[in-house]
Each structure stands twice: as C-alpha cells, then as structure tokens.
C-alpha cells in the first residue's frame, strides 16, 4: 500500500504524457509528474519518492525533500493565513495546512512554529498541529541513561527548555545546565542524563562522566591556540566566565584541564592555563 506522508520505494511501471506511473507490490499506483522525471529514469527502476496529496486530493509522488514527514515534529515558517487556517512552508509545492482548531495560539505570517505532521484518518489527508505536546510519549521509553539523542528545542519554561527527544519523547534541559545559546526550533545533539521515576527525561548537552572529558579537552586546546597559548581561566574562575568563553560547565572544565595537566600539555598558573608547547 502507499504510505501517505512518508517515503515509498516504488517501481516505474510506465511512461505517459503527464509523467511516470509508479507502483508497489500490492498493485497501487501513483503519478510522478513530469517536473520530477529525469532522462535516467526507466521502466522497472526502483525510485524512492515522497507521497502526499495534491490540491485536488489525489495521491502524488515527488522527488523533492519535505522538511517533515508523517508522525514527526519540525519547526516551520508560516507563509500565509487564510479563512481555513495557516499554511506553512514544508519544502513542497503544496503548502501544509494547520487548521485554526489545531493552533495553540493564532498564527501570523512570517512566524515559526513547532508542529506535528499527522494523517487525518477520516479524510486521509495530511494535516499539521501546533498542539504538539499530546503527540509526545514517555510511558514507553526507547532510550536509556547515557544515550546520545537528537533534541528539538520546543519551548522555554521556568525550569528550563522543553525539548522533543528523538522525534518521540519529551525532555527537559535545566537552565543551570545550558552552557550555550539555544534558539526555538534548533535541532542539536544531547544526552539522556537521568530518567526520573515518572519517566521524565533530564537531558544534557554534554556527555556525562569520563566520556565528556576528551571533547572538552579538545575544545580547551582549540581556545588556547586561538589565544596565543594562554587562557585567563582557572579553577578559581566563575562558572559564568567559563561558560561565556568555552560553553561548558565549571565541573567539566576542571576535569578537562586536570587531564591536560597530567598529560603535560598545559601548565596551570594562578590566574589561567598555558600551553606548555607554546613556551
């Protein structure tokens, strides 16, 4: 069967005046319009295409890359607002509709919003919702403490930044663990720091424990080389000063410089650290 809103691997069945007809193993067919057809495409070729519905509500295939696929989250820009809702740019010819009932607040042209793309089972049409919270799932976790994850920055709260983890779970990065700027809609790498008893996820932007030292040591070395072999930072520096210059916590900074010192790479002075090789 054809999977609306997802990528499909389909076989070229025949060429027509309007494009190529593609089919799956169950005999369903969909048109790949001429604008997406290349001279190298031949009958019996297998193509990976995205399938959605056109303005006349017919399934259609495209070789273009959408900014979001079904059952995933993304941050998209509002192109226009009409009498039926807001239309978002998701990288395809037909814009993506967010009906008014699916807006958490009235959307305005030019704004960026986190949305979830879903298939309306009554109409079999793709639609988007800004009420993304109800589509996150933490009852059954697919991650463990220490796992590297992808996080989408969704909203700022009094405690920290709520993020969507691996396109599935909801997590939190506490304000006191934000050692670099994050913007709404950013997608970054993170780590599962702790799983609470209620399955809430505490997320960190840095690896925990010994594994975090090596990349931070490399970051310190890079900063030293860029500053003539000296940094005015030490274990007496404030956490704010370290975060400002290196985008890491004071705890990780102390671990990293300790390792560099034991390796003989740096010398720890009263008010800073210096590359031994630079002397």
Image: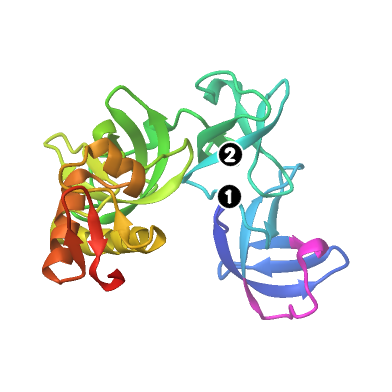
| Whole-percent x, y for residue 53 in the image | 68, 47
Going from N to C along the chain, the mark reached first, 1 or 2, is 1
| Whole-percent x, y for residue 147 in the image | 23, 56
Q: Nearer the viewer, residue 66 or 248?
A: 248
Q: Nearer the viewer, residue 237 or 194?
A: 237
The residue positioned 65% from the left and 28% from the top of the image is 86
Q: Nearer the viewer, residue 29 or 181?
A: 181
How many tags in the picture? 2
Q: Is 187 one of the magenta-colored residues? A: no
Q: Quadrant of residue 259?
A: bottom left
Q: Is 40 one of the magenta-colored residues? A: yes
Task: Give the left or right position of residue 247, taking residue 249 as reference.
Answer: right
Residue bearing mark 1? 67
Name the disc covering residue 37, or none.
none
Q: Quadrant of residue 217?
A: bottom left
Q: Quadrant of residue 42?
A: bottom right
Element assignment for label 1: loop
Crowding near the residue tagged with mark 2, few <14, some 14–19, many ≥20 C-alpha atoms within 10 Å: many
Quadrant of image for the N terminus:
bottom right
Task: Give the left or right position of residue 168, taking residue 217 as reference.
Answer: right
| Whole-percent x, y for residue 165 in the image | 34, 45
Residue bearing mark 2? 76
Highlighted magenta segment, given as a residue range? 32-47
Whether residue 274 can be seen here: yes
Do the residues under discs 1 and 2 have CB atoms within 8 angstroms?
A: yes
Element assignment for label 2: strand
């Amino acid at each position: 069967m054809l999977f609306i809103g997802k990528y499909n691997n389909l076989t070229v069945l025949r060429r027509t005046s309007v494009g190529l007809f593609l089919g799956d193993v169950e005999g369903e067919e969909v048109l790949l319009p001429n604008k997406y057809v290349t001279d190298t495409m031949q009958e019996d070729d297998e193509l990976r295409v995205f399938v959605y519905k056109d303005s006349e509500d017919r399934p259609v295939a495209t070789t273009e890359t959408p900014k979001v696929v079904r059952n995933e989250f993304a941050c998209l820009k509002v192109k226009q607002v009409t009498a039926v809702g807001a239309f978002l740019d998701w990288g395809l010819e037909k814009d993506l509709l967010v009906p008014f009932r699916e807006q958490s607040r009235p959307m305005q042209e030019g704004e960026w919003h986190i949305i979830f793309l879903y298939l309306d089972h009554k109409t079999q049409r793709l639609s988007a919702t800004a009420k993304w919270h109800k589509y996150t799932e933490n009852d059954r976790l697919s991650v463990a403490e220490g796992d590297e994850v992808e996080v989408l920055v969704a909203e700022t709260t009094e405690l920290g930044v709520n993020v969507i983890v691996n396109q599935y779970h909801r997590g939190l990065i506490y304000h006191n663990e934000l050692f670099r700027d994050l913007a709404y809609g950013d997608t970054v790498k993170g780590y599962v720091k702790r799983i609470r008893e209620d399955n809430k996820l505490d997320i960190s932007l840095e690896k925990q424990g010994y594994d975090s030292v090596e990349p931070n040591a490399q970051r310190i070395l890079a900063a030293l080389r860029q500053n003539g072999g000296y940094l005015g930072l030490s274990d007496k520096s404030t956490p704010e000063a370290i975060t400002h210059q290196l985008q890491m916590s004071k705890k990780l900074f102390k671990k990293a410089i300790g390792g560099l010192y034991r390796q003989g790479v740096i010398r720890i002075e009263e008010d800073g650290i210096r590359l031994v090789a630079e002397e």
